[in-house]
Image (cartoon, grey):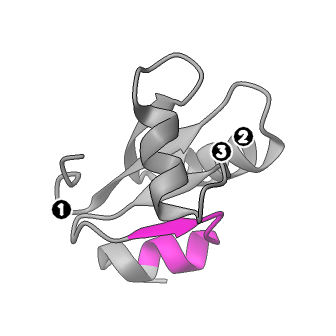
Amino acid sequence: MDAPAPGTITMFSTTWCGYCKRLKSQLQREGIGYTEVNIEEVPDAADYVMSVNNGNQTVPTVVFPDGSAATNPSLAEVKSRIGTPA
């Protein structure tokens, strides 16, 4: 898993996840760039998500430019971790 570019995130999601839709909407509103990876369509994506979530396929799982990951982070946490003013 490559880390996303500075100031952006990678978000692992599914099409039916309400929390994913909410976070995407917030990111778009704030102008924060992201790459979305659907764990039901991309080979090995679900395995990565499970590796950072104690074996669970919990989404949204977000990867930050420093390579760290968070499960269902708030917009404030995303902004803080990518260095965007709150």
Question: In this picture, is 2 found above or below 42?
Answer: below
Label placed on residue 25? 3
Q: Which residue is at 72% across, 40% downward?
A: 21
Q: Which residue is at 59% across, 69% downward?
A: 75
> Quick one: SS at disc 1?
loop
Question: In this picture, is 42 found above or below 83?
Answer: above
Asked if marks 2 and 3 touch (Cβ < 8 Å), the reply is yes
Q: Earlier in the sequence, mark 1 or mark 2?
A: 1
Q: Amino acid at mark 3?
A: Ser
Write down the quadrant of residue 45 in the picture: top left
Instruction: Return the residue at label 1.
Output: 6
What span is colored magenta in the figure?
69-79
> Residue 13: x, y in percent?
60, 38
> Residue 60: x, y in percent?
62, 51
Q: Which residue is at 57% across, 78% downward?
A: 76
Q: Nearer the viewer's eye, disc 3 or disc 1?
A: 1
Q: Amino acid at mark 1?
A: Pro
For disc 2, the neighbor class at 10 Å (few under 14, some 14 to 19, many from 20) is some
Q: CA distance from mark 1 to mark 2?
A: 23 Å
Horizontal arrangement in the rendering, residue 46 relative to residue 82 (left or right): right
Q: CA distance from mark 2 to mark 3?
A: 6 Å
Q: CA distance from mark 3 to mark 1?
A: 20 Å
